[in-house]
């Protein structure tokens, strides 16, 4: 038995950095898992990551999360979840995980400042916006190029705005940006949208929204801030220059799994592969939320997965008491 914990007594004692379950990442999945795990009397640690609270910290009003008939602001919802987890004695540390070791037990998790040991690990690291990878993108990021309309939209009042993408996120962001921009051009590489029908209908009916079909953005130019973009017609091969004061990129997300590549099984897109329920390819390591869910990607489904994973962790720990 490890010296980290003494399980001979009714109330086990722990070393400072030893936990029953370590949850990597916050957001709806992480905080929900923390609530359930702590209520099950598991010593629980949440390491919040580079964006404590996850993607909802960058949203404005959330209208589709159950229990809030008038909606709730994303940051407020996340702070409520965090406080609820803390109420049940979840330890929450605002730090970023740099390295993990899932090859032996207890599992080792290293951050900027500490190394922690966990009997079980729950991955709730989510996903991040996908970049274009074109000339000028990095240069003008934060100077006209944005990946979050609800964060930056108010800075573009009266501007000509372009949004790249054809899914729900792109159409939602374009519609939101019509509150501020003079006009909004949706640039999409195809001649049809992937977004849900209700969102499409709203966008087509909005006089401020224009569609640039079968085009891709190839370059971003400007001086101190973005001034124009080059767009290439995929049908004719011709390139034209469009004047814009803001460019919002909404072309999908990349799972935040780079530190897990050599530790457990990922699919060809980098998402965590689940073997049974919320179990990963490594026994004792679980996953919840957008880190594995590339289909639904909703706050409520992430919270649901967080609940499921915490219950799976509790069951696994009770069945594997020798793994200490």
Image (cartoon, grey):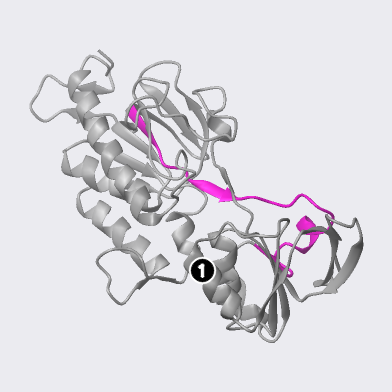
Residue 282 versus residue 53 in the image, above or below: above
* Label 1 SS: helix
Residue 149 versus residue 238 in the image, above or below: below
The answer, for residue 202, to whether it is visible in the render is yes
Q: Is residue 308 magenta?
A: no
| Residue at x-position 36% and y-position 17% | 105
Q: Quadrant of residue 146?
A: bottom right
Part of the protein shown in magenta: 120-146
Q: Quadrant of residue 257?
A: top right
Q: Position of residue 71 (x, y in %)?
A: 34, 73
Residue 58 versus residue 234 in the image, above or below: below
Q: Give the residue at the far right of this rendering.
A: 238
Residue at the spot of label 1: 199
Q: Is residue 125 magenta?
A: yes
Q: Position of residue 297 (x, y in %)?
A: 45, 50
Quarter of the image with the C terminus is top left
82 or 300: nearer the eye? 300
């Amino acid at each position: 038995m490890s010296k980290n914990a003494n399980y001979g007594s009714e109330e086990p004692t722990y070393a400072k950095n030893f936990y029953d379950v370590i949850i990597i990442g916050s957001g709806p999945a992480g905080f929900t898992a923390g609530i359930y795990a702590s209520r099950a009397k598991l010593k629980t640690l949440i390491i919040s990551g580079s964006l404590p609270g996850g993607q909802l910290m960058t949203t404005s009003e959330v209208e589709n999360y159950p229990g809030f008939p008038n909606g709730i602001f994303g940051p407020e919802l996340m702070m409520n979840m965090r406080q609820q987890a803390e109420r049940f004695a979840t330890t929450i540390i605002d730090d970023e995980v740099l390295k993990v070791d899932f090859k032996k037990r207890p599992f080792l998790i290293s951050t900027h400042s500490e190394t922690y040991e966990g009997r079980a690990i729950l991955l709730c690291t989510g996903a991040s916006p996908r970049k274009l990878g074109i000339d000028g993108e990095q240069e003008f990021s934060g100077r006209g190029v944005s990946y979050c309309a609800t964060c930056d939209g108010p800075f573009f009042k009266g501007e000509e705005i372009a949004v790249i993408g054809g899914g729900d996120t792109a159409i939602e962001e374009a519609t939101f940006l019509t509150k501020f921009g003079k006009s909004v051009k949706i640039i999409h590489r195809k001649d049809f949208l992937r977004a849900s029908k209700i969102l499409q209908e709203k966008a087509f009916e909005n006089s401020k929204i224009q569609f640039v079909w079968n085009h891709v953005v190839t370059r971003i130019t400007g001086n101190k801030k973005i001034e124009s973009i080059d767009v290439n017609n995929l049908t004719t091969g011709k390139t034209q220059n469009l004047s814009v004061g803001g460019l919002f990129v909404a072309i999908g997300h990349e799972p935040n799994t780079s530190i897990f590549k050599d530790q457990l099984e990922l699919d060809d897109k980098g998402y965590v592969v689940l073997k049974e329920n919320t179990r990963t390819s490594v026994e004792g390591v679980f996953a919840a939320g957008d880190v594995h869910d590339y289909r639904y990607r909703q706050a409520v489904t992430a919270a649901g997965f967080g609940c499921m994973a915490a219950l799976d962790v509790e069951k696994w720990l009770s069945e594997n008491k020798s793994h200490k």
